[in-house]
Amino acid sequence: MRNFVNPVVLKIFTTKAAVGQYLSQIKASAQTVGFVPTMGALHQGHMSLIRLAQQRNDVVICSVFVNPSQFNDPKDLEKYPRTIEADIKLLGEVNCDILFNPGVNEMYDDNEQWHLSIGETEHLLEGAFRPGHYQGVTQVVYKLFNIVKPDTAYFGQKDYQQFLIISKMVDMLAMPVELVMCPIKRETDGLAMSSRNIHLSTDDRRHALILSKTLNYIKDKFDGNNIAALKQEAAQLINAEPGVELEYFEIADGDTLHTATPQSNKIVALVAAKVGKTRLIDNVLISS
Ligand code: AMP
């Protein structure tokens, strides 16, 4: 168990070389490294990942890097919140050990190419609405894992499909890292915490609750055989909410992300919608 009687001073690195060198000393002293990759605009969802990493590792490193290669819409990239001063403050408060905050030029060479054949999951759900997104995600996570070489990396269930795809990459490339999926942290009214929530107007914020409400409703009503009817009902509920434009609602097999069947043993309901101008995603495990 870590002892926070003496507060930890957050060490901040912006270069691969410096963070790699610091981490190699830590590993040489047989300490374990837990890693929480993020795009910043940190909130209590991110903090819950860091806390879990702290319970299970000697040293915890968080990265803050808004990865351009995973954005298919340049406007979305430009608009993505960047709050590094506040992020540093939060990381200090939670006693995180290390922040890696590289610039784009530190992470990418000019005209760099990347393609990883990760199978059809890449093109479903998020992949269908954000073409190329998971190529960018695997590209940056591969780079980050090679720089940090963590024992364990922590990701949120909030990005359920991302977790499946990163797990696939780690298996395919035999990367020596354990992955942990952490539960979704929500506001008290049920809204899943997200860096993008700061773009929601007061009205958007109220309308956005339809997503978590519908997910919970579907979870309650699910009986194993009513998948098609429930999907339809969920879409109707969400489309009826003012200011909300549904992209997809799926009751999926938790391994393949195809529509679940009565034979699926792990089932997850996933949703994506634009609320006002802000794109939100959420999901709930129905059976696992
Ligand atoms: P992001 O900064 O949005 O890329 O997220 C970084 C990590 O935090 C990802 O693994 C996310 O799944 C996770 N995360 C984001 N929001 C939440 C949340 N509300 N609860 C738990 N984890 C989250």
Image: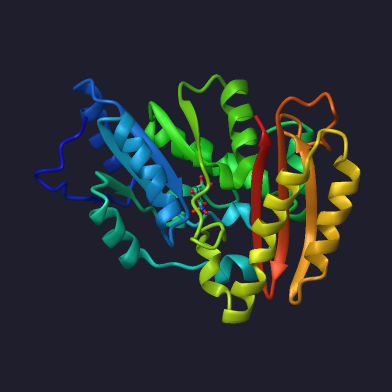
Who is closer to the viewer here, 103 or 222? 222
Point 44% across, 34% down: residue: 153
Point 53% across, 54% down: residue: 67
Who is closer to the viewer here, 56 or 166? 56
**Is any atom of residue 90 visible in this view?**
yes
Q: Is residue 49 left or right of residue 66?
A: left
> Which quadrant of the structure image shows residue 219?
top right
Vertical relation: 2 (above or below) 265: below
> Which quadrant of the structure image shows residue 209?
bottom right
Quadrant (top left/top right/bottom left/bottom right) for the N terminus: top left
Point 60% across, 51% down: residue: 111
Who is closer to the viewer here, 196 or 261? 261
**Is any atom of residue 64 visible in this view?**
no
Furthest toward the left, the residue is 6
Point 84% across, 38% down: residue: 259
> Which quadrant of the structure image shows residue 103?
bottom left
Return the x and y of residue 50 as percentages of the image width and height. Answer: 36, 44
Quadrant (top left/top right/bottom left/bottom right) for the C terminus: top right
Return the x and y of residue 257 as percentages of the image width and height. Answer: 76, 36
Vertical relation: 144 (above or below) 95: above
Vertical relation: 8 (above or below) 35: below
* Colour theme: rainbow
Vertical relation: 170 (above or below) 193: above
Return the x and y of residue 248 as percentages of the image width and height. Answer: 79, 54
Return the x and y of residue 280 as percentages of the image width and height. Answer: 64, 61
> How many numbered discs, if any?
0
